[in-house]
Image (tube, rainbow, N blue to C red):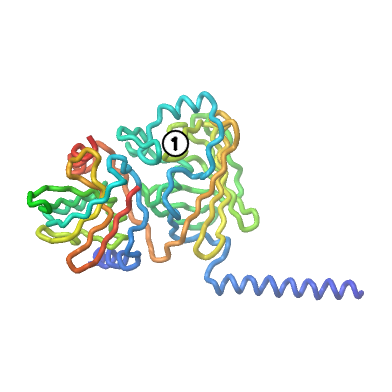
Amino acid sequence: MRLSIQVLIGTLIMGMLAASGARAQTDQGWSPRDLSGVWLLDGGTATFSAEPPPPMTDWAAERFAANRPSVGPNAVLDANDPTLVCLPPGIPYVLTIPTPFELIHVDGQLLQVFEYDHSLRRIYTDGRARPDDLHLTGMHQWMGYSIGRWDGDTLVIETSGFNDQTWLDRSGRPHSEELLVTERLRRVDGETLVDDVTIHDPKAYTESWHGRLVFKLEKDWEIFEHICVGEDNGSAEYSEYKERAWE
Amino acid sequence: MEIKALILAAAAASCFAAKPGLAHHGAVAYDRESTLSLEATITAFDWENPHALIRFETDGDGTAHEWVAETAGLVILVRAGWNNQTLQPGDRCTVVGHPAKNGSHTMILQRVVLADGRELGNYIP
């Protein structure tokens, strides 16, 4: 009986603490499972990871040698980054572009609306399984196919089904159709979103590769258009300028 | 009117310094080790994507030179406080940036100091 009372009191205290915590979150104006808002990459970066990449396979090394980035330590004037001709950037590349995105919760999905090219990433949170055969059946996706599930207050997002035409980052790191990107996305405070990214691509990398991106809430921002304009479709003035400054 | 209000709201909400923007074309053409601060007379302001261009003249050495400064994309400029009326032909201002390595009197803009002392920044990838 005494044990039961102790358990009851303990349960009540825990309940009060939990309620108190919930109120505190409400008072702060944010909840860890509410990712809504406009977010901007904290700091510029040419890659999603501060860690050196793991050893590449011969297949990937050959591709990497042919890639010519426009930013970073290996930047060259005659870059061939696929985004320069307005091909979709893919995941995680698009997350390293320092233009904002908006996260919107809708029933069964988390929508990630990127200002960059006004593109949409649909993350299914309705419990469906990730199709693991998209790349085998010809349904390659530039931005992949994403599902998400909550692990505590962390949203675990798995994205696969890619083609192999995008780069992992602006440094020109390649990936294959076997790419699986796992993100552990969590709101650590009212202003900060942390995205721990893991690259698993056995065709391209001999080990998994980890990185972290941090995003800051931009409370007063809304998403505008940042439409990609290709090298051949930009303004005539800029094309003329580029010849003068860059050649 | 709504668009104007929107732009003003976005400008008011932004910090004075430019927020990061798209590093689409990079800045490898420019000498990041060198910074020029030029007293300028604006001749044109090309408010167009993918990058706005500031055309100006400078006669710092007694010889008139025509320069062009490249900026970030328009959304990035708006969030940093710019709009398409920020610079007008004939305006005097100070243009600060990294010059092109090829010596072509072009630069990537760091900031502009307007005649009234206001500074407007730019994002450099």
Three-letter amino acid code at the position of disc 1: Trp
Judged left or right of residue B65, residue A232 is right
Residue B111 versus residue B99 in the image, above or below: below
Q: In which quarter of the image is residue A64?
A: top left
Rendered residue at 74%/71% (across/down)? A14
Placement of A148 over or under A6, stated as above or below: above
Q: Quarter of the image containing the N terminus of chain B?
A: bottom left
- In the foreground, A102 or B23: B23
Q: Looking at the picture, how far across and down is residue A169, in whole percent?
A: 45, 40
Q: Taking the image as drawn, is residue A147 in sight?
A: no
The extreme left residue here reads B63
Residue at image coords 18%, 38%: A244
Q: Mark 1 lies on which chain?
A: A
Residue A16, placed above or below residue A182 = below
Q: Position of residue A62 (x, y in %)?
A: 46, 24
Q: How dense is the environment of label 1, judged by Cα within 10 Å: few (below 14), some, or many (20 and up)?
A: many
Residue placed most toward the observer, B100 or A95? B100
A94 or A48, which lies in front?
A48
Q: Residue at x 75, y 74 (%)?
A: A13
Q: Can residue A227 be seen in this view?
A: yes
| Left or right side of A16 for A234 | left
- Residue named by callout 1: A167
Q: Is mark 1 on a helix, strand or loop?
A: loop
Q: How many marks?
A: 1
> Percent from the top left, x then y, of residue A122?
48, 48
